Each structure stands twice: as C-alpha cells, then as structure tokens.
Image: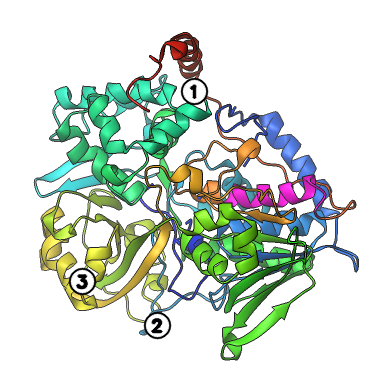
C-alpha cells in the first residue's frame, strides 16, 4: 500500500509497471467472493501446474500477443506458455525481462517506486517458490512503518503477526493501542463507522455502484469519522495507497483497499520488501528466463504498440502495428495473431485505443477506459555521505505544506537491503541510500530536479528525522511519471475495462484496474497480486471461451486469498437480510444513492 508500480519513462505502453503497478475463485459475481487458501487448494494448484508443464507449443500452436510487460502481462504470458501457446510479449521498456538493471547516468541502480508485498499475496509467493527461489533471499522480514507529520512521529504500524492474534478488528485495535503517538482515543474510535460500511458496500451490484459514485470524503463524514482521524491518518494512508486524497477517490475502492490491507485479518497490513536489487531482477527475470528456456515466447523490448487491428467483420483481433525503437522507430506489422491480451494501464490504454479506430468503434468499453485519468508520480533516489538511523525502514510523510498536496514516502534502502555495494553501483559505499517518492505529485513534478532534492533534504526529511540535517547528498536521481498510475475516481467503476471484451472474442484485458467479473479475486486496489492474477485469468478466459482452439483449454490455477472471518460473514448476512427488507421502502443504505 505504500506503493504500487510505474514505467521508467513515457516510452512504455504498460503503465502497470509502476509496478503494479498488484485471480479467481470463480465466484458468481464480484460481490460473492469466497477466500480459502487451504493446504488442499495449494496442493491441487501444484498438481495442475505440473500438468501444464507437460504442454509445449507446436507448429500449430495459437499465437497470442501480450501488450504490456508488467505483472499482468507476465502473468498472462506464463499461463499462455504453459497452456501450449506461442507468445509474443511487447513493451516499450528496452529490456522488460529484468536482465539489464536500470542505471542512473552515474551508473547507480534505480527502481521506479518502492513496492511492498503484503501478507495476502498467495499467487506471487507461489510464483517465487515455483521458480525455485527462497523467500528469505527475495523478501525482507515483515517490517513496521512510521507516519510523520510536522508535529513529529504520529503513528507506527507494527508487524501485527508478532502479537497474539485475535478476531478482526479487535486484534488491530489491541496491537496498535500504544502506537498512535498523538491521535486521541476519542478520534480513533470514530473509525467504527467505517466497519459498518465495510459489511454493507458489497451487498449487491447496485449498492457497490452507489458507493463507487460517492467520494470517500463524503462517506467519512456520513459515517462519523473525526476530521482529525481523517487528516492525520486516513488521508496520508490513502495518498500513498491509492495515490489520491479521499475527496478524489471512489468510496467503494477505498473500502476495498482498507478491508483487504487492514481489516480482513489482524495480519493483513503486514508488509515486506525486496531484499536485493529490484523486483524486475529478483522475480521477473527468473520468470522470463524460465519461460524463454522452456517455451515458445518472444519478448520484444523497445516496442511501442500503435494499433490493434480487427478482422473485416470486427469480431476478432487479427494483427497489430508497433514501432521498433531499437531500429530507430521502424514500424512493424504483426499479422499472424490468434488472440491478444491488453495488459495496459490508463495511459497505455489511451494511446493504443486512440490509434486503433476499428477497435474504438467496436469496443466502447475500451473507449470509456481510455478516457479515465491517471496519477502523476515523482520517484527519487538519494545517496548520502553518512548512514542515518531511523526507527523504521519504511516511512510516510503527511500534512507537510511542502508536499504540495502529494503523498510522500521515504525508504531506507540500506536498512532493507544488506548488499550496500549493489546499492552504490561501482561507486564507493559512503552512507545511506534513500528511495523517496511523491504520489499525486503533479505539483512536485513542476520543480527542477535540484529543487526536489533540496525540498527533501532541507525541509521534509529533517523535520521527520532531525539526523538528516547532518547528511550531505553525494548523488541523486529524479524521474517523473505523468499519468502513470490508475486513478480510481468516484464513478469510475463503470468505465474500468472488463477482463473479457464482449464484442471481440479473442481480446482480453489484464491489470490491477480490470474488472474480472465471475473471475474476481480478493486482492484489491493498486496491487501487484491483483495485477499478476488478472494476467493469469486473462489467459484462462481465452482458453475457456475456445479462443485458443480446441487443443488449448487448460487453465492456470489461481489461489484465493484467506477466507473472511466468521464475524464478518455473519455481519454481511444479517445486514443483507435487513437491507433486503428495507429496500422496497427506499430505506436501504440511505447514505448512498
């Protein structure tokens, strides 16, 4: 929740890289999701996966183009390869496989955004195990996080798994009782109003859509949350979790986020980070190597997809046109496509659909998705002349005027990653290395690189941790990502792209913003797990509908997240019974319309 994902620059058609920049239990609707990751389910998944490994592409194998190499694109590529397809994966990044780390002009490593791996990431964790990687080599331990304001330390989010586990939300209440340093208990208890909204908003489709049309700000007022609770804790959490303030976010998506990351279970908010190098190097690259060695996949980096072309009757994708930036922008036509996966964020969707007139005319749902807005992100990395000690490696900045409306985070990479030499590239190790990011950062992006670093080193960081006053910058790097992250604005649910395109039989979508319908998954929000699983389910949808031919029908198994706790299930059942009685009288959930 402290971060999702982005592309490195404006060259990539895949916005889910930042990263995220994250599926199914095959529930009948998105509002009837069951979550059960039992040992038997995982064992079944591994038996199914073993069968998939036996399938290899042949000369008659269907050819599938996957546009976008974020988590969704790689998830789709994996499932399609293992099902026996020939896959071409295209992305604007020069090397989407992670084999070549991104370096700053001075040769130091850089990654766009620092992304966490939460407790309920079962499919990403299973991928790591399947690749033969040890979790202790890939991930850090679960770590606490600190929230700072101009008044100092506001709160510490602990590792909830280290406390005696109680039913939710009692476990969270007791585990954090002493962790709020300034927020009075009288303000904290007003959070109780949201607990009812969380059992009500998924009652049925129309109720969910009504919550989606409302801003989170309005919901907080109607549910009685105190202004101080919102300003000091909820607002900064949303700014670094969904990258916008509550008045600009869908109440439904905010409820999804808070439930999935914080309230489903006591340990839901426990988070860990990449322990070495980058996500692309530690997870994506081993996956890419495995797929290229064992299956028929071609990864085309530096490829900007311009147009997706349809058959004369406009019922199928038959080809695409892209620019090969490695040959100076030469246009290439790919015509032998049997199916296509659009693993794109809002910015990439706007570009591809806007240049595909037949697609835009035939699939109005994609035109609506292309009209949705994106969020600006500014990512920085700073190398210091000394080591600075902080209470926690992951930190959130809130209520600082200098943020200019953005959400801010800073991560002490030298505390998360033990290989300090790797953090400094070929330069001599001198001190701490920070990743500092701004979300909803359009105003910050207008500053020069020098002024952004000055803002951090002379105002924000020293106000949070005074020891930064004594540190000097050895090197720094700033990147801006305009419109790179999905914006879940009020009313946006109706315009988000569906997994399956009703009018085009062999076209599917993937990404954390995609509506997965009957294949909906419990992972929500800007989430690597959700993005990855959406890719798996996009491939599964093609197989299930026969778009890949009669010989390619196997689906990639998907692990659901943990089952809802009994008190939540009971609360939802009782609430639905009451609201179904009140609905004919127009009294059901009167705070939404």
Residue 449 coordinates in the image, percent (x, y):
24, 76
Measured Cα–Cα span from mark 3 to mark 2: 19 Å
Tag 2 residue: 107
The numbered dot on residue 203 is 1
Tag 3: Cα neighbours inside 10 Å, few (<14), some, or many (≥20)? many
Q: Is residue 234 left or right of residue 531?
A: left
Tell me: 516 left or right of 577: right
Name the dominant secondary structure of the magenta segment: helix
Q: CA distance from mark 1 to mark 3?
A: 47 Å
- Return the residue nearer the eye: 563 or 319: 319
Secondary structure of residue under mark 1: loop
Q: Which residue is at 17% across, 59% downward? A: 404
Residue 344 position within the rendered picture, expressed as x and y whole percent measured from the top left: 55, 61
Residue 537 falls inside the magenta stretch:
yes
Examine the rendering and report whether any part of residue 524 can be seen: yes
Of pointers 3 and 2, the one earlier in the residue sequence: 2
Q: Is residue 169 visible?
A: no
Task: Examine the rendered structure and indicate whether residue 244 appears above or below residue 181.
Answer: below
Tell me how far mark 2 sits from mark 1, CA to CA. Answer: 53 Å
Decide whether residue 464 is among the magenta residues: no
Q: Which residue is mark 3?
A: 453
Q: Quadrant of residue 578?
A: top left
Q: Residues within 10 Å of mark 2 (few under 14, many from 20)?
A: few
Circles 2 and 1 in contact, beta carbons < 8 Å: no
Name the residue: 30% across, 46% down: 248
Magenta span: 532-547
Question: Considering only order in the chain, which callout, 1 or 2, is on the residue closer to the N terminus?
Answer: 2
């Amino acid at each position: 929740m402290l971060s999702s994902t982005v592309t490195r620059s404006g060259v990539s058609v895949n916005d889910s890289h930042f990263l995220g920049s994250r599926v199914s239990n095959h529930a009948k609707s998105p509002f009837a999701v069951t979550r059960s990751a039992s040992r038997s389910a995982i064992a079944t998944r591994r038996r199914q996966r073993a069968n998939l490994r036996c399938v290899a592409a042949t000369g008659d194998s269907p050819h599938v183009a996957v546009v976008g190499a974020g988590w969704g694109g790689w998830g789709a590529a994996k499932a399609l390869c293992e099902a026996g397809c020939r896959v071409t994966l295209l992305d604007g990044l020069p090397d989407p496989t992670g084999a070549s780390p991104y370096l700053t002009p001075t040769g130091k490593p850089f990654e766009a955004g620092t992304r966490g791996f939460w407790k309920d990431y079962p499919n990403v964790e299973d991928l790591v195990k399947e690749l033969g990687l040890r979790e202790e080599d890939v991930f850090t331990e679960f770590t606490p996080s600190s929230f700072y304001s101009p008044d100092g330390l506001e709160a510490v989010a602990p590792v909830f798994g280290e406390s005696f586990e109680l039913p939710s939300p009692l476990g969270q209440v007791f585990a954090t009782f002493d962790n709020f340093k300034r927020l009075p208990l009288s303000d904290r208890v007003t959070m109780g109003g949201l607990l009812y909204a969380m059992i009500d908003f998924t009652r049925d489709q129309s109720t969910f859509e009504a919550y989606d049309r409302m801003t989170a700000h309005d919901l907080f007022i109607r549910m009685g949350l105190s202004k101080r609770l919102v300003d000091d804790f909820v607002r900064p959490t949303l700014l670094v979790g969904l990258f916008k303030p509550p008045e600009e976010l869908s109440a439904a998506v905010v409820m999804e986020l808070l439930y999935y990351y914080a309230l489903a279970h006591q340990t839901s908010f426990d988070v860990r980070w990449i322990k070495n190098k980058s996500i692309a190097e530690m997870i994506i690259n081993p996956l890419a190597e495995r797929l290229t060695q064992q299956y028929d996949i071609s990864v085309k980096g530096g490829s900007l997809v311009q147009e997706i072309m349809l058959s004369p009757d406009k019922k199928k994708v038959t080809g695409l046109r892209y620019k090969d930036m490695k040959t100076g922008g030469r246009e290439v036509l790919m015509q032998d496509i049997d199916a296509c996966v659009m693993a794109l964020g809002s910015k990439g969707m706007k570009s591809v659909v806007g240049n595909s007139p037949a697609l835009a005319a035939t699939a109005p749902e994609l035109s609506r998705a292309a009209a949705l807005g994106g969020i600006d992100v500014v990512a920085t990395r700073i190398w210091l002349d000394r080591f600075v000690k902080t209470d926690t490696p992951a930190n959130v900045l809130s209520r600082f005027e200098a943020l200019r409306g953005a959400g801010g985070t800073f991560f002490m990479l030298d505390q998360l990653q033990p290989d300090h030499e790797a953090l400094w590239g070929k330069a001599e190790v001198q001190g701490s290395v920070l990743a500092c990011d701004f979300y909803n950062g359009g105003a910050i992006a207008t500053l020069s690189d020098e002024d952004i670093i000055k803002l951090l080193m002379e105002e924000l960081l020293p106000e949070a941790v005074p020891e930064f006053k004594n540190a000097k910058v050895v090197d720094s790097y700033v990147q801006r990502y305009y419109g790179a992250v999905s914006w879940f604005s009020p009313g946006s649910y109706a315009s988000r792209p569906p997994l399956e395109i009703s009018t085009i039989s062999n076209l599917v979508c993937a990404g954390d913003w995609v509506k997965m319908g009957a294949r909906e998954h419990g992972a929500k929000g800007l989430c690597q797990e959700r993005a990855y699983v959406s890719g798996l389910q996009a491939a599964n949808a093609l197989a299930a509908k026969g778009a890949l031919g009669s010989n390619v029908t196997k689906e990639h198994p998907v692990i659901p997240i943990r089952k809802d706790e009994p008190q939540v299930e009971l609360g939802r059942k009782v609430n639905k019974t009451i609201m179904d009685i009140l609905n004919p009288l127009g009294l059901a959930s009167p705070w939404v319309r």
